[in-house]
Image (cartoon, rainbow, N blue to C red):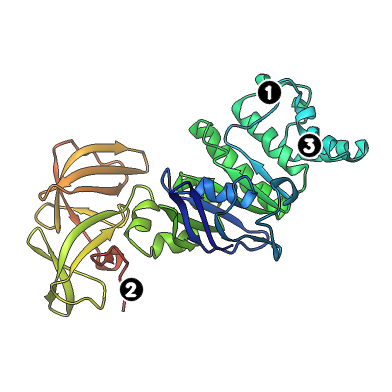
């Protein structure tokens, strides 16, 4: 797609989107609520008409092609199953409307049912199914059409946490089996990280960055992407660059902190970022940051420590193991220079030298 924009009245929701999705790729649109990701998906599907720009499918411009004729299949958050029909009838309904031969319909229905492990459910009505089973049927209804592209709009958001994990694994396996192009919308960055070949991060109707999950995690283009990708989210400290022996650094709590080798002038207003798993716990008098704990999450393999610095900034550290910490306890935090991300006053990442 090239320079795709979408307006609702006087409100512009998408601003000049440029994106190419490769054949067989699993691409995830991610971003906060209201960023335009579902609108972008619906515009690709033909359920919304682009206000300007160009949408191509297999080198064919489809701006004026109806949703039914684009060769796509969409799976919705709400499942959208017909309640009065059995699972078998739900799977077959679209094919029957296209007047496909009955034996081909049956073959496709059974193939999808085997793939999704819903063969024993074919006689049931949707009200007799669990949430996960309904979602499998909704996906199966898309599979039987054999579309060129699957479009999935937050399909797992109605499921509980444990079932979402199971269904994520099933979707990943399904993508591998079908070798199909899938475009997936979610606000859950964990889903994005675990499913995507590439992630498209959106904010306010604009693309902030496109890349593989690890590219976005390790080399975020700006402060927004750095804070959105990764859980727990990245910590940020406002600072001013100062000259230090052997390079540039900052003063944190009155203590010098080296930065990775960057082209940043002393006196520049910057923000330094570090992921909770990269910061290390130490004694108060040895850390660059002193942190007063406000919440301790014991997760077994790690302990997530939440607190505030002496300047009142919220800060999170992941400590390995099961050492006990108490709310109100003060700890020191060291910031390894090689683990730091640095952002200029506009929020753009500064590249290492």
Residue at image point 38% right, 63% down: 220
Labelled pair 1, 2 in contact (Cβ < 8 Å): no
Residue at image point 49% right, 34% down: 161
Q: Position of residue 147 (x, y in %)?
A: 74, 49
In the rendered structure, find residue 227 and report the number of the disc placed on it: none
Q: In this view, does 25 lie above or below 264?
A: above
Query: Which tag, 1 or 2, sits closer to the chain's start?
Result: 1
In the rendered structure, find residue 351 and report the number of the disc placed on it: 2
Residue 286 position by quadrant? bottom left
Look at the numbered disc 2 and give the secondary structure of its residue.
Answer: loop
> How dense is the environment of label 2, judged by Cα within 10 Å: few (below 14), some, or many (20 and up)?
some
Query: Which tag, 3 or 2, sits closer to the chain's start?
Result: 3
Q: In this view, does 258 lie above or below 263?
A: above
Q: Is residue 65 above or below residue 58?
A: above
Q: Number of numbered discs present?
A: 3
Question: Which residue in the structure is indicated by mark 1?
Answer: 126
């Amino acid at each position: 797609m090239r320079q795709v924009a979408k307006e609702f009245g006087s409100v512009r929701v998408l601003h000049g989107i440029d994106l190419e999705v490769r054949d067989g790729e699993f691409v995830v649109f991610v971003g906060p609520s209201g960023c335009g990701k579902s609108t972008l998906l619906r515009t690709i599907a033909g359920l919304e008409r682009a206000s300007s720009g160009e949408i191509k499918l297999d080198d064919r411009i489809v701006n004026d092609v109806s949703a039914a004729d684009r060769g796509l299949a969409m799976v919705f958050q709400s499942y959208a199953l017909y309640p009065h029909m059995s699972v078998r009838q739900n799977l077959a309904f679209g094919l029957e409307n296209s007047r496909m031969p009955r034996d081909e319909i049956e073959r496709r229905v059974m193939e999808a049912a085997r793939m999704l492990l819903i063969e024993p459910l074919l006689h049931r009505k949707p009200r007799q199914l669990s949430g996960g089973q309904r979602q499998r049927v909704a996906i199966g209804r898309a599979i039987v059409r054999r579309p060129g592209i699957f479009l999935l709009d937050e399909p797992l958001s109605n499921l509980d946490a444990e079932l979402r994990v199971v269904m994520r694994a099933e979707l990943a396996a399904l993508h591998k089996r079908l070798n199909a192009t899938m475009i997936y919308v979610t606000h859950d960055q964990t889903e994005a990280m675990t499913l995507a070949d590439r992630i498209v991060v959106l904010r306010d109707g604009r693309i902030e960055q496109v890349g593989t999950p690890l590219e976005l995690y390790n080399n975020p283009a700006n402060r927004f992407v750095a804070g959105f990708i990764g859980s727990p989210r990245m910590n940020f400290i406002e600072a001013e660059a100062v000259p230090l022996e052997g390079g540039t650094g900052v003063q944190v709590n009155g203590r010098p902190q080296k930065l990775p080798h960057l082209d940043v002038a002393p006196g520049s207003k910057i923000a330094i970022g570090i992921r909770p798993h990269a910061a290390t716990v130490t004694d108060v008098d040895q850390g660059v940051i002193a942190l007063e704990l406000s919440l301790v999450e014991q997760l077994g393999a790690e302990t997530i420590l939440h607190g505030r610095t002496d300047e009142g900034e919220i800060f999170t550290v992941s400590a390995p193991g099961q050492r006990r910490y108490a709310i109100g306890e003060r700890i020191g935090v060291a910031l390894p220079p090689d683990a730091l991300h640095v952002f200029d006053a506009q929020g753009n990442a500064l590249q290492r030298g």
